[in-house]
Image (cartoon, helix red, strand yellow):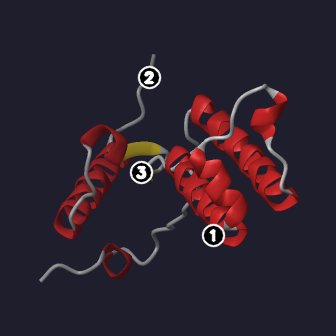
Amino acid sequence: MCLPPIKRYPDIRIEGENYLPQPIYRHIASFLSVFKLAIIGLIILGKDPFAFFGMQAPGIWQWGQENKVYACMMVFFLSNMIENQCMSTGAFEITLNDVPVWSKLESGHLPSMQQLVQILENEMKLNVHMDSLPPHRS
């Protein structure tokens, strides 16, 4: 039977934090956030940004002017989906005593519970072994 790591090692401290995406993806998400609000504002106000550039409004813009609520919801949800995708890293990094022991970014998958317990046991044994060595003299 495989006990969860928290029960097997009650003194272990577990912390979670956000792993920031690459700067280009953060900038894209920020731009989309502002762009989304501008598009929603133009839809609500009934302004045609294409006329400013001397272009004919595409059919989807005309549909949006006729169906403002649906158009605003569509812009909001689609842009949020893209923003979230830009901000998601999929990171699941495990460190023990500030030493990385697992990286989902490198391995491409999450560890199973058995793998996680095995990793922790190996690291704990290594730490106990290192602590029992005599100090190195130069």
Q: CA distance from mark 2 to mark 1?
A: 73 Å
Instruction: Give residue 74's quadrant in the image.
Output: bottom right
Question: At which x and y percent is residue 49?
Answer: 79, 38
Q: Label 1 crowding class (10 Å Cα cut-off): few <14, some 14-19, many 20+?
A: few
Q: Does residue 105 sit above or below 63 in this rendering?
A: above
Contact? badges 1 and 3 (CB < 8 Å): no
Label 3: which secondary element = loop
Q: What residue sits 51% from the left and 67% below the top?
A: 13
Position of the N terminus by quadrant = bottom left
Question: At which x and y percent is residue 122?
Answer: 23, 54
Query: 33 or 62: which is nearer to us?
Result: 62
Query: 34 or 30: which is nearer to us?
Result: 34
Q: Looking at the image, is mark 1 or mark 3 nearer the viewer?
A: 1
Is 124 situated left or right of 93 in this image?
A: left
Q: What residue sits 83% from the left and 56% below the top?
A: 46
Label 1: which secondary element = helix
Q: Is residue 103 visible?
A: no
Q: Which residue is mark 1?
A: 70
